[in-house]
Image (cartoon, grey):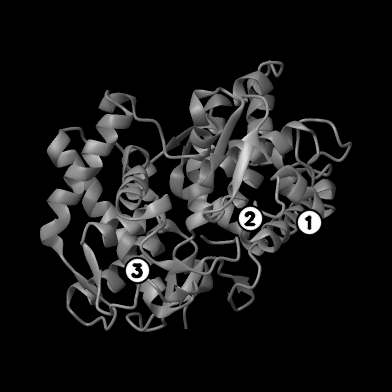
């Protein structure tokens, strides 16, 4: 009998995805073939992309939501944080912003745009979602009093679809994919905050997570595995419609026949959240260690890179046009191979460039990096930069 808690870690993600990836490499998959001879060229493409974005390899930042807040070269967080003089309170405020923003970050669809009135810029996809969510937070709408820069349980539980539509400029001609799923996530986040006063305080403030994490640190250091484990525990019931095992919600965890018990965890958005908390926690004096305990993120940019550059090839000519859902076996398999392939790509990038894993952790390879390279090759291959597969998103995974 599988212990459900054993599935709630990055170690479980890497181990179980490795089993599926080996299944594919051994030729047992009816869906894909693996082509390791394409690894060096894929890494070279990632390096080329990284050098275009960050000429100094030592200056590559972490892959996180904060890069989207900086879209178009605009510092949007700085003016919000400036009046908050206390480092711990600044960290709480940053957490108040970034957690809901990450939960709102599933794919927007190709037709949606956000016009940022302050900068005069127009952004799409992840950058647009990031800027839109920051501007929404800036209004104080996530606070119980309706105007303070913080996020409270009561405000999130009261969010209406019309609130999201207004904040994200959704209208005829500017559709946003998965709006119902996004609203559900925000409301469930509010319920999770309210139900855990030991973590979020009696006032039900999201930013109180900083104090909870600070209490788990030793000498100002917090292992990345502990950070992710805490997030998986306190946010486990945020995800709607997910499987449970012995009453434990499994989150982003699906099934594949390569495993005896069939369970393959990914925890993509929660790991994306962990990466996005590195900077707020550091600002508050908490250093997250052991970053490579976390895995790469199995989504359509990182995973699309594999397909577009031929590391992973679908057996069926109809694969790209088939409208897949997240639980479908080929999608579970593609995501699992993506997790392991990103480890291989990171090792090859370091081999070609020279830095160690400590100098260029996976979080920086993703940013430099594989995610941007996946977007870049998609733009070269298809009008509008659509991914090389068709995913039906509910706004909670992709």
Please state the horizontal and vertical placement of residue 309, each as a whole percent of the image. 22, 57
Q: Specify the farthest residue to the left.
A: 37
Please state the horizontal and vertical placement of residue 136, each as a whole percent of the image. 72, 38
Camera-side mark, 1 or 2: 2
Circle 1 residue: 161
Helix, strand or loop for disc 1: helix
Q: How dense is the environment of label 1, judged by Cα within 10 Å: few (below 14), some, or many (20 and up)? A: some
Horizontal relation, residue 103 to residue 42: left or right: right
On residue 176, which mark appears? 2
Please state the horizontal and vertical placement of residue 36, each as a whole percent of the image. 14, 61
Q: Disc 3 and disc 2: Cα gap in Å?
A: 25 Å
Q: How dense is the environment of label 2, judged by Cα within 10 Å: few (below 14), some, or many (20 and up)? A: many
Q: To which quarter of the image does residue 281 belong?
A: top right
Tell me which residue sits at (31%, 27%) in the image: 54
Horizontal relation, residue 97 to residue 52: left or right: right
Helix, strand or loop for disc 2: loop
Q: Disc 1 and disc 2: Cα gap in Å?
A: 12 Å
Camera-side mark, 1 or 3: 1
Tell me which residue sits at (34%, 75%) in the image: 319
On residue 288, which mark appears? none
Q: To which quarter of the image does residue 241 belong?
A: bottom right
Please state the horizontal and vertical placement of residue 218, each as a whole percent of the image. 50, 35
Circle 3 residue: 334
Query: In the rendered picture of this protein, how many numbered marks are placed on residues?
Result: 3
Dot 3 or dot 2: first in sequence order is 2
Horizontal relation, residue 139 to residue 212: left or right: right
Camera-side mark, 3 or 2: 2
Q: To which quarter of the image does residue 129 belong?
A: top right
Horizontal relation, residue 139 to residue 290: left or right: right
């Amino acid at each position: 009998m599988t212990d459900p808690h054993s599935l709630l870690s990055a170690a479980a993600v890497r181990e179980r995805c490795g089993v599926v990836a080996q299944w594919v490499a051994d030729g047992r998959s009816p869906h894909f073939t693996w082509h390791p001879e394409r690894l060096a060229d894929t890494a070279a493409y990632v390096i080329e992309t990284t050098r275009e974005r960050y000429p100094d390899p030592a200056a590559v930042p972490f892959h996180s939501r904060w890069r989207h807040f900086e879209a178009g070269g605009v510092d949007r967080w700085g003016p919000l944080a400036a009046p908050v003089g206390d480092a711990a309170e600044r960290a709480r405020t940053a957490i108040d912003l970034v957690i809901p923003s990450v939960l709102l970050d599933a794919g927007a669809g190709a037709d949606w745009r956000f016009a940022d009135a302050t900068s005069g810029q127009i952004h799409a996809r992840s950058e647009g979602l990031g800027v839109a969510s920051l501007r929404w937070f800036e209004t104080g709408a996530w606070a119980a009093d309706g105007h303070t820069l913080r996020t409270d349980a009561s405000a999130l539980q009261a969010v209406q679809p019309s609130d999201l539509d207004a904040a994200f400029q959704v209208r005829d001609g500017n559709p946003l994919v998965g709006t119902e799923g996004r609203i559900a996530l925000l409301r469930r986040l509010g319920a999770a905050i309210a139900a855990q006063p030991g973590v979020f305080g009696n006032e039900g403030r999201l930013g109180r997570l900083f104090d909870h994490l600070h209490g788990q640190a030793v000498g100002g250091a917090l292992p990345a595995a502990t950070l992710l484990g805490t997030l998986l525990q306190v946010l486990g019931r945020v995800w709607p419609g997910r499987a449970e095992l012995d009453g434990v919600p499994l989150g982003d965890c699906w099934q594949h026949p390569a495993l005896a018990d069939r369970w393959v965890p990914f925890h993509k958005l929660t790991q994306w959240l962990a990466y996005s908390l590195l900077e707020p926690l550091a600002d508050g004096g908490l250093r997250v260690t052991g970053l490579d305990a976390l895995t790469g993120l199995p989504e359509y940019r990182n995973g699309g890179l594999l397909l577009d550059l031929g590391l992973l090839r679908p057996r069926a000519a109809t694969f790209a046009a088939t409208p897949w859902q997240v639980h479908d076996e080929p999608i579970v398999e593609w995501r699992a191979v993506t997790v392991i392939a990103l480890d291989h790509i990171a090792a090859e990038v370091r081999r070609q460039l020279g830095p160690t894993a400590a100098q260029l952790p996976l979080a920086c390879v993703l940013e430099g990096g594989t995610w941007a390279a996946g977007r870049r090759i998609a733009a070269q291959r298809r009008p509008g930069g659509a991914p090389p597969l068709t995913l039906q998103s509910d706004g909670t995974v992709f």
